[in-house]
Image (spheres, rainbow, N blue to C red):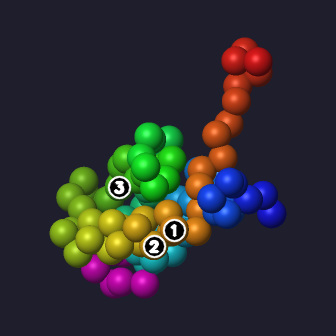
Amino acid sequence: MTKTSTNKTLKTAPELERYVLNELRNCSACNSISAVTVTETERPDSNWEVSHINAAGGTVPRVCTEICEDAVTRLRQSYDLVIEIEPEEL
């Protein structure tokens, strides 16, 4: 388990996406949500965000957006995104 300087555990984007999806699946109104996308961002409190929510039919119910935002706020307190370096960037 790797910790950052702020004592947050580092997680990959797929791990963070799974955590957010698990939160969404606790609400029956969010059964149409099939995926979320976590991307790197520059924020004072974290280095990641959910940049996309994919729902069957294309429309994300408002309650699901709110649950996602709440989950991200909570998860950011404990986790930072592992920044993956591509071999050509070395």
Left or right: where does residue 12 sit relative to residue 58?
right
Residue at x-position 70% and y-position 25%: 86
Q: Position of residue 22 (x, y in %)?
A: 51, 75
Q: Quickly name the residue at label 1.
A: 77
Left or right: where does residue 12 sit relative to residue 59?
right
Q: Nearer the viewer, residue 45 or 70?
A: 45
When asked about the image quadrant of residue 60, the answer is bottom left
Region rendered in magenta: 26-31
Residue at x-position 73% and y-position 59%: 3
Residue type at tag 1: Gln
Q: Is residue 21 visible?
A: no
Q: Is residue 5 visible?
A: yes
- Asked if the residue under mark 1 is in contact with the one under mark 2, i.e. CB atoms within 8 Å, the reply is yes
When asked about the image quadrant of residue 32, the answer is bottom left
Cα gap from disc 2 to disc 3, whole angstroms: 18 Å
Q: Residues within 10 Å of mark 2 (few under 14, many from 20)?
A: few
Most distant residue in the front direction: 5
Q: Position of residue 72 (x, y in %)?
A: 42, 65
Q: Quickly name the residue at label 3.
A: 53
Left or right: where does residue 90 sit relative to residue 53?
right
Is residue 25 shown above or below 10? below
Left or right: where does residue 64 sit relative to residue 62?
right
Residue at x-position 28% and y-position 79%: 29
Q: Is residue 80 found inside the magenta-colored segment of the image?
A: no
Cα gap from disc 1 to disc 3, whole angstroms: 21 Å
Residue type at tag 2: Arg
Most distant residue in the top direction: 88
Q: Could you say whether the residue bearing mark 3 is in a helix, strand or loop?
A: strand
